[in-house]
Amino acid sequence: MAAAAASESVLCVKTEVKVYRIPPRASSRGHRAADWKLDQADWSGRLSVTTKGETAYVKLEDRVTGELFAEAPVDSYPGIAIEGVTDSSRYFVLRIQDGAGRRAFIGVGFPDREDAFDFNVALQDHFKWVKQDAEALRQEQDLPPCPRLDLGFKEGQTIQLHIGNMKRRQQPRPRPVTTTAGTSGAVPLLPPPGGKHPGGKGSPKRTTESQTPRTGSDAVLPLT
């Protein structure tokens, strides 16, 4: 099954741009906008930046009908497809290309510095993303393949589980407390001194010295 074609995305649209015929580069130092006839633009219209896959396309279109005037495929930025001039931030040299593969260099200028800044940032952000995506793909390819784990049971293989505390120890049941009467219940309180026994009978009588007669030398004689 063939892979789906990449969709086209729009990064930037500027409604006013001017195109100039430029002279050949005089030196290796780059192009200068001051060498162009800035007061005699050869064309004016709309500029848009679109992307399809990793390639960006700078399109010059009629601002009313949308008819394509010229197109510049851009594979890298900065690069030979788009160059900034040495004496201004609003002008660029664009390498356009037609359907037959013929190429030409033209000058492009924005009336506002903010428009030129947006154009520049749109291209920078796109190729920054392309670079990051390529680096992530390279790192993924450099990783060693992970061995595939076979977690299935072989024929006749079993597994044994040891789960602790499955059986609770049989703890002895508490024995009931038995009173003197043989009934279960709470431990009875001791009777208070001089009180009655819980059985209903009075406390046993205590023997005092006045009740026990003394004999022998310990006897006390009454005074006369």
Image (cartoon, helix red, strand yellow):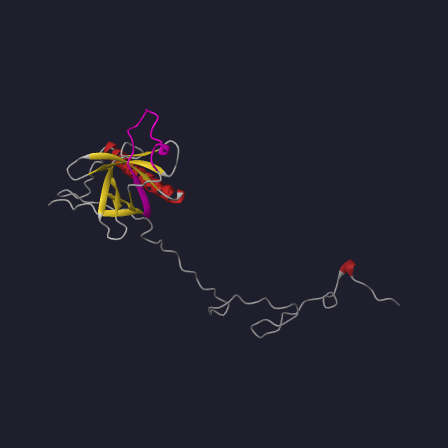
Query: Magenta residues?
Result: 14-37
Q: Nearer the viewer, residue 223 or 140?
A: 140
Left or right: 186 with respect to 128? right
Quadrant of residue 108 within the rendered picture: top left
> Could one spot residue 54 in this view of the protein?
no
> Could one spot residue 154 in this view of the protein?
yes
Residue shown at 26%/53% (left/top)? 64
Quadrant of residue 58 within the rendered picture: top left
Q: Work out which residue is located at the far bottom of the displayed protein and give it.
A: 200
Q: Quadrant of the N terminus?
A: top left
Residue 47 lies, in percent from the top left, at 29, 45
Quadrant of residue 98 within the rendered picture: top left
Asked if residue 74 is among those painted magenta in the image, a careful observer would answer no
Q: Nearer the viewer, residue 87 or 220?
A: 87
Asked if residue 32 is among those painted magenta in the image, a careful observer would answer yes
Left or right: 75 with respect to 200? left
Q: Nearer the viewer, residue 65 or 95?
A: 65
Q: Work out which residue is located at the far left of the displayed protein and give it.
A: 1
Q: Nearer the viewer, residue 124 or 213?
A: 124
Residue 184 lies, in percent from the top left, at 46, 68
Left or right: 219 with respect to 65? right
Residue shown at 61%/68% (left/top)? 191
Q: Work out which residue is located at the far top of the displayed protein and give it.
A: 27
Residue shown at 21%/36% (left/top)? 147
Q: Quadrant of the C terminus?
A: bottom right
Q: How many marks?
A: 0
Q: Is residue 78 above or below residue 14?
A: above
Residue 192 lies, in percent from the top left, at 63, 68
Residue 59 lies, in percent from the top left, at 25, 44
Q: Is residue 170 above or below residue 151?
A: below
